[in-house]
Amino acid sequence: MKILVSGSTGLIGSALLSHLTGEGHAVTRLLRARVSPGEKGILWDIPTGTLDPRPLEGLDAVVHLAGESIGAGRWTLNRKIRIRESRVRGTRLLAETLAALARPPQVLVCASAMGFYGDRGDEVLNEDSAPGSGFLAELCGAWEAASEPAAEKGIRVVRLRIGLVLSADGGALKRMLPPFQLGVGGRLGSGQQYMSWIALDDLVRVVEHALTHDTMRGAVNAASPSPVTNREFTATLGRVLRRPTIFPVPAFALRLLFGEMGEALLLASARLEPARLLSSGFEFQYPELEAALRHTLHRRAR
């Protein structure tokens, strides 16, 4: 297929690009700027709403992963605005441009996040569950809605509500590893909050599954069928690393250090069920946490 990918320099995008090209697909990158003079790709500018539609004619599929990181710092007002603009305005610009094409792609796969559901305790959340409240839930709702112009055009739109992505090369796990490797890791807050996670390799396969299976449409929970509490995650990571996990971080300390971001990303509970993936026949290579952690840490060691 001819596939356009945004966010191709990020953790997920880099892995996806490598996988898709390895499978023989012709992949073009959607870039905010060229990082090297000879770099190939289509340029766009979200703040000015600039995206030339001509190179997009005749694409088979688009994977949209671009967006400013939500975990890189405290959520000041300005940072919230940047996060929202990068996701909502960027998605709307892309969706409207694709919808106006004479030969639009058959499918658009857009990233969203499990933050759509907010803090829900031990409630099991499938794709039909109601949205939550708070900045992340409102952001994800607006982010998903921004792709609607493409759906109205008849493009099959898949919105992946992605869980915590496990990779030792980036993201949350990479930031967790140093204290755990030193033996000073521990549960966060009460440790009772559910963490919905997915191995990076499985997430790449989920994206490919969404591209190639016509039954996939609308919201899709992209998370393992085996979510765990933070206490269970902590104990499992310690066991894999052969390190003690006896230094808990109190909830008040996380709120003091990270503010609203800490509350939403570290203390909120989301217990996702990937109902639509499982019913479509998708099989996870790493459905259990310990095997997923051992796999990603072994790859890093090599």
Image (cartoon, helix red, strand yellow):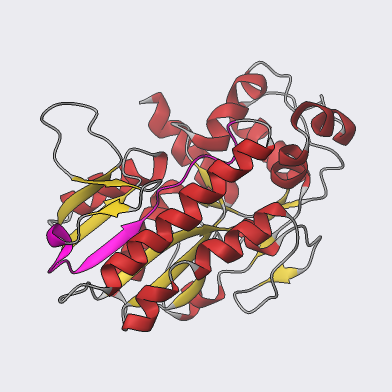
The relative height of residue 69 versus residue 277 in the rendered view (above or below) is above
Name the residue rendered at 41%, 71% in the picture. Answer: 158
Q: Residue 135, percent across and down?
A: 70, 53
Residue 301: name its quadrant: top left
Check if residue 102 falls in the magenta segment. Answer: no
What's drawn in magenta, residue-wise? 54-72
Q: Residue furthest top?
A: 182
Q: Residue 159, percent across and down?
A: 46, 67
Residue 53 placement, left or right of 62: left
Which quarter shows the N terminus?
bottom left
Residue 152: name its quadrant: bottom left
Q: Residue 171, percent across and down?
A: 51, 36
Q: Can residue 206 be seen at all in this image of the molecule?
A: no
Provide the major secondary structure of the magenta segment.
Answer: loop
Residue 39 placement, left or right of 159: left
The relative height of residue 101 versus residue 41 in the rendered view (above or below) is below
Name the residue rendered at 55%, 59% in the picture. Answer: 224
Name the residue rendered at 32%, 84% in the picture. Answer: 154
- Numbered disc total: 0
The relative height of residue 96 versus residue 177 in the rendered view (above or below) is below
